[in-house]
Image (spheres, rainbow, N blue to C red):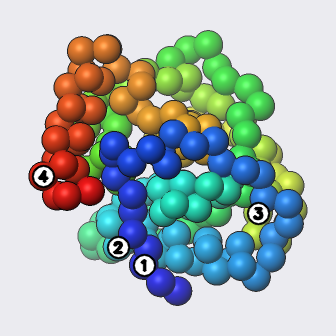
Amino acid sequence: MAIREIIVLPDKQLRLVSKPIEKVTPEIRKLADDMLETMYDAPGIGLAGIQIAQPVRIITMDLAKRDEEGETKPRPRVFINPEILSASEDMSVYEEGCLSIPEYYEEVERPARVRVRFTDLDGKVQEEDAAGLYATCIQHEIDHLNGVLFVDYLSKLKRDRVMKKFTKAAKLAGK
């Protein structure tokens, strides 16, 4: 396993639409392992392949909560070719952040519940209902696979401000 570099706004790769994965191969399993290690190191709760410059439809996620002793038992998840089959009409608002837009958080409104289909690392197609943080996170990560960022849900004024801030930071860093 290896920690990969997470690409950051305004990197244009973040706007790419990721390609479907044809088959679960040892290379895809290694990519999933690297993504999980990168996500935990960041630290984050979700990561899409494109965020490490891999434009393929793969997501890693871990929404494990701390127990009474403050310990977290990892519950890593991998979603290959995830797609939303249906979404509830009722909405929920969560404060979202993104490893590709570091230290920036805003409230985003999304469907409260979704049904998702994906392939697991064994090559089996799964369907699940997602609600709460799981629903928000899976929608956020699938958006990445489609070249959409959570800031796209904000007002034009807020979106322009964050884009300007990260573009300026990239210029100062010489990127």
Badge nearest the viewer, 4 or 1: 4
Q: Name which of mark 3 and mark 1 comes first in the sequence.
A: 1
Secondary structure of residue under mark 1: loop
**Residue, disc 4:** 172
Badge nearest the viewer, 4 or 3: 4
> Quick check: 171 above or below 119?
above
Q: Are marks 1 and 2 in contact (CB under 8 Å)?
A: yes
**Please, what is the three-letter code of the amino acid marked with disc 2?**
Asp
> Quick check: 167 above or below 118?
above
> Quick check: 8 above or below 36?
above
105 or 112, which lies in front?
105
Secondary structure of residue under mark 3: loop
Image location of residue 91, percent across then percent down: 50, 18
Q: Which mark is residue 3?
A: 1
Q: Residues within 10 Å of mark 4 (few under 14, many from 20)?
A: few
Spatial distance from mark 2 to mark 3, Cα to Cα? 23 Å
Can residue 170 be seen here? The reply is yes
**Residue, disc 3:** 120
Q: Name which of mark 1 and mark 2 comes first in the sequence.
A: 1
